[in-house]
Image (cartoon, helix red, strand yellow):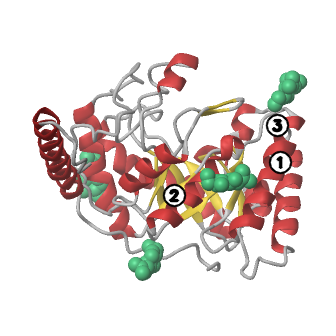
Amino acid sequence: MGDPNASDWLKSQQKASRKARWLVGILGLVVLLALHKSLYGINYGPVNATYPWCTNTLGDVIEDIKLLSQLTNRIRLYGMDCQMANMTLWAIKLLNVNMTVIPTIWVDNNATTYQRQYNSLFTLINDHGVDKIDGISVGNEVLFRKEITPQDLFNRIADVRQKVNALPNVKKKVPVFTSDLGSNVNDALVAAVDIALANVHPYFGGVPAQQGANWTFEFFQQNDVVVAAKAGKEAIISEIGWPTAGNSQQAAVASVPNLNDFIQSFICAANTKQVKYYYFESFDTPWKTAMFTLLEGSWGLFTPDRKLKDVTIPDCPPTAPGFNGFS
Ligand SMILES: *[C@@H]1O[C@H](CO)[C@@H](O)[C@H](O)[C@H]1NC(C)=O
Ligand SMILES: *[C@@H]1O[C@H](CO)[C@@H](O)[C@H](O)[C@H]1NC(C)=O
Ligand SMILES: *[C@@H]1O[C@H](CO)[C@@H](O)[C@H](O)[C@H]1NC(C)=O
Ligand SMILES: *[C@@H]1O[C@H](CO)[C@@H](O)[C@H](O)[C@H]1NC(C)=O
């Protein structure tokens, strides 16, 4: 830039590129106006972070967090591999945005995977402390997949809770839990966790998008809130969303207009009721489409190139506090 030897041609190119930057700036502003910090939390997985093919970059995570920080103050992650929690916390720090994270140790039936992610969690806490960590999840939908026994899972949760809360740089009580299908929340699970995290999916309930919010509030109340409350604990929706492509489930149809209808009826109603939820999910995931189905890969509010789908984000800030009894 500003090279004194630049030819007229080069100068005109630079003028054009300045114009382009102006345009990018204006378009960026349009995106900003379309986003509102109305979500209690959101689920996020960085692109290309599939172990052992970790080609994800901090630059990409920063671009993602720029968007997500305009939607919510809270992020939930799915694993420790590929530096995904470390990069997320670094992006939050570098952008200086007010966001907190739930890191997750991914649990399957592979002891090597567990040990690697377990070690990464302790490195993360050693490097970042827990100021920006709301809680720690040990596994997601492990009971549903039946990869290890419930008792094995509960023992791991207890182990992580004890070790994390004994660290010298941990000055607050960090809640430790797992997340599983809302229908898997029972007394034994509730006894093992500090908070009951339930994945609640009206889509798999087979209801039309327009009834998805009502279905969710009723299902969550009956299957999760009352079960957790018996033990004096709180329940949180760890996944809630609507897909835009893939096979229908009875009356539930995947489409962008249905996603829009669902978020119009769910987000502000949930915020008014002070239901705590992590929206599922941030971006479409082509790797899940390739590995599983189109339906699995199509739950993003944004496309993989960070464009908001043709939906309106409602403007109604959540007022529910952080996790009860923890700060
Ligand atoms: C965490 O990410 C930062 C920024 O990319 C990097 O410098 C650091 O080495 C990472 N930490 C670990 C343990 O890899
Ligand atoms: C940061 O976010 C938390 C949780 O939403 C909120 O309670 C707090 O007021 C925010 N802090 C600032 C400085 O905005
Ligand atoms: C467990 O995962 C490691 C790599 O993370 C792999 O090398 C090993 O083969 C896996 N073990 C089983 C039993 O699948
Ligand atoms: C949702 O529930 C409310 C109150 O329970 C009711 O008034 C409304 O009609 C329901 N909406 C749908 C689409 O079922």
Mark 1–mark 3 distance (CA, rounded to whole Å): 14 Å
Quick check: is the Cβ at mark 1 less than 8 Å away from ligand 3?
A: no
- Secondary structure state at the residue bearing disc 3: helix
Residue for point 87% across, 68% down:
162
Q: For mark 2, what is the residue?
A: 91
- Secondary structure state at the residue bearing disc 1: helix
Percent across and percent down for residue 53 are 66, 28
Classify mark 2: residues with Cα within 10 Å, few (<14), some (14-19) or many (20+). many
Callout 1 touching callout 3 (CB < 8 Å): no
- Classify residue 188 by image quadrant: bottom right
Quadrant position of the C terminus in the picture: bottom right
Residue for point 72% across, 42% down:
106
- Secondary structure state at the residue bearing disc 2: helix
Classify mark 1: residues with Cα within 10 Å, few (<14), some (14-19) or many (20+). many
Kind of residue at badge 3: Thr
Q: For mark 1, what is the residue?
A: 153
- Which of discs 2 and 1 lies nearer the camera? The answer is 2
Answer left or right for 178 relative to 155: left
Quick check: is the Cβ at mark 3 less than 8 Å away from ligand 3?
A: yes
Q: Is residue 36 above or below residue 19?
A: below
Residue for point 35% across, 49% down:
213
Mark 2–mark 3 distance (CA, rounded to whole Å): 25 Å
